[in-house]
Amino acid sequence: MKVELPARVRKAVDRSLSERERAVEAEEAAAAATQDAVKAMLGAGLSTRDAGELLGLTRQRVQQVASGR
């Protein structure tokens, strides 16, 4: 199905799709960075509580991230 949209509307749709794609990529990058930070902090001897405090996460979430969940 092909829908003809005014240029202004097409531009808005394209921008929305592009920004949503960027948001997904940013979320994936943030998750990877969090996992790296958790591994580094736990490897340096910090507790899950301290790591969570530094990252703004619960200690339970730190444990999940550390185990790859």
Image (cartoon, rainbow, N blue to C red):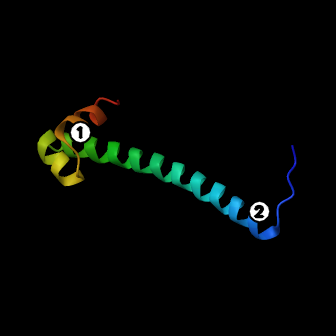
12 to the left or right of 26: right
Determine the residue positioned at 33% across, 42% down.
35
Determine the residue positioned at 52% across, 54% down.
23
N-term-proximal mark, 1 vs 2: 2
SS at circle 2: helix
Q: Is residue 46 visible?
A: no
Determine the residue positioned at 37% across, 49% down.
33
Kind of residue at disc 2: Arg
SS at circle 1: helix
Q: Quadrant of the C terminus?
A: top left
10 to the left or right of 39: right
Classify 11 as above or below 32.
Answer: below
Q: Quadrant of the N terminus?
A: top right
Q: Position of residue 15 (x, y in %)?
A: 66, 62
Give me the C-alpha separation between circle 1 and circle 2.
Answer: 42 Å
Q: Position of residue 54 (x, y in %)?
A: 19, 54
Tell me if label 1 and label 2 are in contact, CB under 8 Å. no
Determine the residue positioned at 48% across, 53% down.
26
Residue 52's disc number: none
Mark 2 highlights which residue? 10
Q: Position of residue 65 (x, y in %)?
A: 30, 36
Kind of residue at disc 1: Val
Number of residues whose C-alpha sits closer than 10 Å to that of mark 1, classed few (under 14), some (14–19) or many (20 or more): many
Q: How many marks?
A: 2
Mark 1 highlights which residue? 62
Classify 49 as above or below 64.
Answer: below
